[in-house]
Amino acid sequence: MYISDRVMHTDYKKSAIVSSQIFKWKMALLDQRAEVFKNRSSGKTDDQVIVDKQHATIGWLTVETDFLEKCLGLSR
């Protein structure tokens, strides 16, 4: 028995919820966890996430280019 299962077992004993209902909720969450937590923390749309990733890539490439120019003695 996993820790989460033991916690659930104790919790449903304290409440009026039957263990089968908790099990159904757990299975639903496990089946749909990607959709539940998708972009939820940032509240951003898919387009905003793509733009943020592109800005991060541009920033990283700028840092790499500056580093290589400095190492090779080149200037812009």
Image: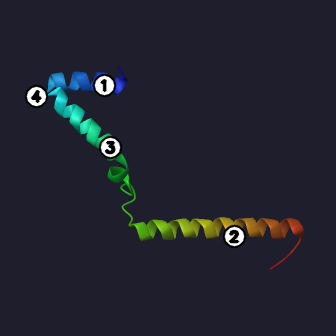
Q: Are marks 1 and 4 in contact (CB under 8 Å)?
A: no
Q: Which mark is residue 31?
A: 3
Q: Earlier in the sequence, mark 3 or mark 4?
A: 4
Q: Quadrant of residue 2?
A: top left
SS at mark 2 in the image? helix
Q: Give amino acid for label 2.
A: Thr
SS at mark 3 in the image? helix
Of badges 2 and 4, nearer the viewer stands: 4
Crowd around label 1: few <14 · some 14–19 · many ≥20 (10 Å): few
Q: Earlier in the sequence, mark 2 or mark 4?
A: 4
Q: Which mark is residue 16?
A: 4
- List the residue tagged with mark 1: 5
SS at mark 4 in the image? loop
Of badges 3 and 1, nearer the viewer stands: 3
- List the residue tagged with mark 2: 62
Q: Give amino acid for label 4.
A: Ala
